[in-house]
Image (tube, rainbow, N blue to C red):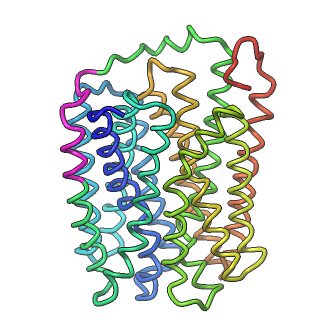
Amino acid sequence: MERRTLIVLLGGIAALMVAMGIGRFAFTPILPMMMDHHLFSAAGAGYLASSNYLGYLIGAFVLTLVQVKGRSTLLFAGLIVSIATTWGMGVFHSLEAWLVLRSLSGLASAIVFVIASSIVLDRLSALQAGIFYGGVGAGILLTGLSVPLLARNSDWTEVWKGLGLISLILGLAAWYSLRDRHTGTQTLSSPHDHDHHPSAVRRVLICLMIAYGLEGLGYIVTGTYLVAFAKSVSSIQNIASLSWMLVGISATPSCVGWSMLASRWGKKWTLTVAMLLQSIGIAIPVLIPSSTAVLAGALMFGVTFMGITTLSVAFAKDLYPQNNRKIIGLLTTFFGLGQIIGPLIAGLLILGNSSYRTALIGAAFIIFLGALSLPLGIGRTDRKQLKLAK
């Protein structure tokens, strides 16, 4: 690997750790601490999660509409907002302020994810792209390790501030690595460019967006409530942090593994298998409530959730290779729609039933439907027109 490519890769990983691993997912291991202080109910946690995903949706959707003239500048702005909102969660003490901060954090996450992907994927092979997306898992692992250490001699406010400082260090490294690299105006295709593609390609993209939207709806319920659920079924000390660290450990190398499988099986079937495995992983701890099942579910969730993102983005990029930023933004928009709906429904179900069972089983079923939509939808396309559907 060339030195410049390595620098860009490491910078991209750091950017994902800041905006995704910490900015988006640190809320999960800190959530039980905040709920223990009766700062909000399960429904309130759902509102906070959905506000983050609303910001994510807005950011992804806007990026499909506007022409980006300075990707480096936009990436810098996204990193700064992500760092500031992580720190700010420990400064403010009202649900209204947290809703605003989580919304802005989601907006920043979408900007960093889409723009960093656009910058970094220009230089990487499929296998290297898997390493890049492993940055989200590395960020989750970092939060799983950092949260209990920061909480040992302080409360939840200092945990947020500590993560803010960690984000600042990683954000500076990401900016140094990615600044002024491929930052010129990106040539975008016109809205009519899709007309030059076979109808089979458009059909595959529609099926992919449906599946990815259902993935967003289902997976985020687990991503939001996994740690809180773990505490409710296990007496093991620090099971919450342990389960979340396991998610990060398994997610970090998973993207490379799924990319290698996709090169042999094809993206359609690899995505289908990954989503089926994830639905099983979500259901197991609910059907067999035990510490072992919780850890097994965390492992299966971690192994699959970023692999599904990696494969979906790579699939979309293959469909429209000349317009990857816009297509990634469109795919992320559908994912964001699912993420908004999921926590809202789950929070109400948990509040109404005083149990995570219905919400998590529902999430597993939604992802199962998403998995089926790929072979059922794509499988009927004309394979002479679209070899990617194999």
Q: Is 340 covered by the magenta stretch? A: no
Position of residue 118 in the picture relative to residue 260 (left or right): left
User: Quadrant of the rendered structure where residue 229 is?
Assistant: bottom right
Residue 52 location in percent, x, y? 42, 57
Position of residue 32 in the picture relative to residue 170 (left or right): right
Using the image, determine if residue 78 lies above or below residue 380: below
Using the image, determine if residue 388 lies above or below residue 50: above
Q: How many numbered marks have been drawn onto this rendered protein structure? A: 0
Residue 154 location in percent, x, y? 28, 88
Using the image, determine if residue 198 lies above or below residue 229: above
Residue pictured at 46% horizontal, 54% vertical: 53
The span shown in magenta is 171-185
Q: Between residue 224 and residue 99, name the one nearer to us.
A: 224
Q: Is 177 covered by the magenta stretch? A: yes
Residue 238 location in percent, x, y? 50, 85
User: Quadrant of the rendered structure where residue 57 is?
Assistant: top left
Q: From the image, which quarter does the N terminus lie in?
A: top left
Residue pictured at 74% horizontal, 26% vertical: 390
Residue pictured at 46% horizontal, 30% vertical: 125
Residue 5 location in percent, x, y? 32, 34
Residue pictured at 33% horizontal, 88% vertical: 152
Using the image, determine if residue 327 lies above or below residue 77: above
User: Looking at the image, which residue sits at the far top?
Assistant: 196
